[in-house]
């Protein structure tokens, strides 16, 4: 009852003055003194005190209605603020931290020791996992650090030009390329063999022609002749046979053939001469 009277006095004092902080302080002091006196003279149990206090707070709230705030509302607001601070603290501890001037992300903010948080230095970079680092590079995603590399598993096949490629796709490309190269290698080997064969044939032909050219010509006073010749060119050997005949005094004919390996060179010719 005394407590209610004290709070009522405080309410009356506050409602009668809204002009200065000094008057409010004086009225409040008087009310508190009255409240103290009321508390000293009461021997009620905690339930009675709670009831009396509740009544007093209601009176105080009525007295402060002109200030647009109540003690009850203030108490509730402070309590709610405390809950919000606790929730904010929990959110900060459990959520990922983002730097205000850097969009790099560090995961596992509750980790300690080997699981301590990862810090990135590169702009627009992400480092995932304990002890991961982006090495200060920008626009990268890192899952490890030099000497502590990690694998990225369950990667879907890439479909766009900037997508990551998994091992299955790489193996498929390797198989396709190996098959294509095997076919090309067979063609290259065949072409190489043909070139070697052509080279050998050319050398044999040159050797055969050399052998044919080495046979001496028929003398002017002879009517018939037969000769042989031989030659070699870059390791290829050849032999040639030649027959010549004088048909008239001014007309002469010849036929010859050169042989080297499996190659044959056959030639024939006529010569007409006069003075």
Image (cartoon, helix red, strand yellow):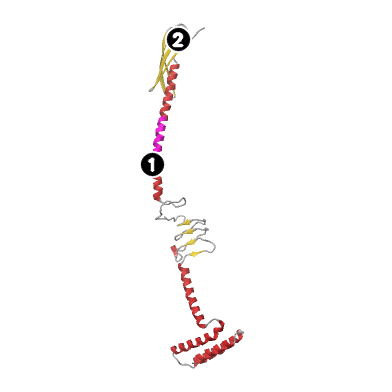
Q: Is residue 119 magenta?
A: no
Q: Is residue 99 above or below residue 24?
A: above
Whole-percent x, y for residue 253 in the image: 44, 11
The alpha-carbon separation of the residues under discs 2 and 1 comes to 64 Å
In the picture, measured across the screen, residue 200 lies left or right of residue 14, that is left
Q: Please, what is the dominant secondary structure of the magenta stretch?
A: helix
Quick one: label 2 or label 1, which is nearer the N terminus?
1
Q: Label 2: how many residues lie within 10 Å, few (<14), some (14-19) or many (20+)? A: some
Give the residue drawn at x 43%, y 88%: 47
Whole-percent x, y for residue 226 in the image: 41, 11
Whole-percent x, y for residue 15 in the image: 57, 87
Evaluate whether residue 216 shows in this view.
no
Q: Looking at the image, do the residues carrying marks 2 and 1 touch, with CB atoms under 8 Å apart?
A: no
Residue highlighted by disc 2:
252
Whole-percent x, y for residue 235 in the image: 42, 24
Q: Which mark is residue 179?
A: 1
- Asked which secondary structure carries label 1, the reply is helix
Give the residue drawn at x 49%, y 65%: 97
**Residue 191: quarter of image:** top left
Evaluate whether residue 97 shows in this view.
yes
In the picture, measured across the screen, residue 20 lies left or right of residue 210, that is right
In the picture as drawn, the residue positioned furthest to the bottom comes out as 41
Q: Is residue 173 above or below residue 255?
A: below
Q: Is residue 186 magenta?
A: yes
- Residue numbers of the magenta segment: 181-194
């Amino acid at each position: 009852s005394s407590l209610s009277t004290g709070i009522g006095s405080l309410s009356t004092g506050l409602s009668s003055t809204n002009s200065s902080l000094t008057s409010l302080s004086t009225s409040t002091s008087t009310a508190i003194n009255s409240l103290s006196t009321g508390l000293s003279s009461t021997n009620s149990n905690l339930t009675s005190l709670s009831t009396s206090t509740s009544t007093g707070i209601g009176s105080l709230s009525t007295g402060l209605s002109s200030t647009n705030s109540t003690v009850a509302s203030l108490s509730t607001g402070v309590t709610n603020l405390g809950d919000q601070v606790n929730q904010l603290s929990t959110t900060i501890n459990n959520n990922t931290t983002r730097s205000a001037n850097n969009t790099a992300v560090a995961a596992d903010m509750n980790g300690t020791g080997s699981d301590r948080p990862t810090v990135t230095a590169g702009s627009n970079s992400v480092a995932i996992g304990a002890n991961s680092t982006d090495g200060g590079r920008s626009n990268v995603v890192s899952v490890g650090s030099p000497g502590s590399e990690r694998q990225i598993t369950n990667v879907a096949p890439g479909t766009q030009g900037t997508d990551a490629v998994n091992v299955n796709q790489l193996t498929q490309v390797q198989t396709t390329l190996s098959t294509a190269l095997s076919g090309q290698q067979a063609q290259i080997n065949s072409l190489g063999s043909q070139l070697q064969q052509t080279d050998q044939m050319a050398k044999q032909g040159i050797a055969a022609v050399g052998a044919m050219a080495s046979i001496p010509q028929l003398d002017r006073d002879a009517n018939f002749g037969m000769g042989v010749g031989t030659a070699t060119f870059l390791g290829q050997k050849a032999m040639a046979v030649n027959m010549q005949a004088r048909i008239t005094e001014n007309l002469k004919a010849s036929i010859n053939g050169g042989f080297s390996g499996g190659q044959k060179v056959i030639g024939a010719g006529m010569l007409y001469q006069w003075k």
